[in-house]
Image (cartoon, helix red, strand yellow):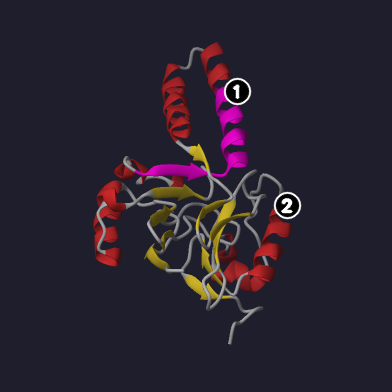
Amino acid sequence: MDLEYTVISIGQMSANPLWNERTDVRPGHATTTLVRSEEAVILVDPSLPCELLVPRLADRANLKPDQVTHVFLTCYHPEMRRGIEAFDSASWLISEHERETVGVGLIEKMEEAQEHDDQDLVQVLKAEIDMLRRTSAAPDSIAEGIDLFPLHGVTPGLTGLLLTPPSMSLLVTGDAIPTFGHLQQGKVLPHCADLEKAKESFAEAVEIADAMVLGRDNLVLNPIRRPF
């Protein structure tokens, strides 16, 4: 099995609660990862704007946008998908649970905005709904050695990718584990859809993965489960 992974862009939090930051002090963006297995070329969380992400993809992986076969979103947070429209020829994937939950919420907000005749908000929500409709529910296995790994809690359907090459298991965590500081301290983000589920997902991630690509940080070895 030919399985490769590359961090395209290392993310950062706009405000890190572990540093006692209560308001935004920097631009927030997610870590973007490229995963390849056989013919599948999967870009995870295309967070940077298109004009920054496209040259970064060329610099880090020698790829053009039309060579990406799939885009996978760990969740539907806007910061995860700023650059997604550069990959119009790819399949856009997201977990079924996240897709359905977000969709219901967006429709409810749309109906409320229409009732209050808030046309600006209606247009914003329409764009969000149209983009969500462009996505498809991801299969349990996107390609050989690349499987969905539910990490619900921070958002209702947040889902990572578990890679199982021969050497060691690697989990792309999304915001389930945002930074190495959160991993070391065993902490999840304070604002979660379901705090208890988020804590359970954190524990499951630490239990299964030898290494992780964190949601707002780099690739790190699991300090609990070192493979060597």
The quarter in which the C terminus is drawn is bottom right
For residue 31, which quarter of the picture? bottom left
Residue placed under numbered mark 1 in the picture? 108
Q: Residue furthest right?
A: 196
Task: Let me know if residue 103 is in the magenta part.
Answer: yes
Callout 1: helix, strand or loop? helix
Say what amino acid the circle numbered 1 marks.
Answer: Glu
Cβ–Cβ under 8 Å for marks 2 and 1 = no
Q: Which x, y percent locates residue 157?
A: 62, 45
CA separation, marks 2 and 1? 24 Å
Please indicate whether residue 65 sits to the left or right of residue 34 in the image: left
Say what amino acid the circle numbered 2 marks.
Answer: Lys
Q: Name the residue: 51% across, 71% down.
A: 165
Q: Which x, y percent locates residue 19?
A: 55, 66
Instruction: Examine the rendering and report whether any part of residue 92 can be seen.
Output: yes
Please indicate whether residue 70 sits to the left or right of residue 179 in the image: left
Residue placed under numbered mark 2 in the picture? 197
Label 1: how many Cα within 10 Å (few below 14, some 14–19, many 20+): few
Q: Name the residue: 59% across, 82% down.
A: 227
Q: Name the residue: 61% across, 82% down.
A: 226
Q: Which x, y percent locates residue 187?
A: 66, 64
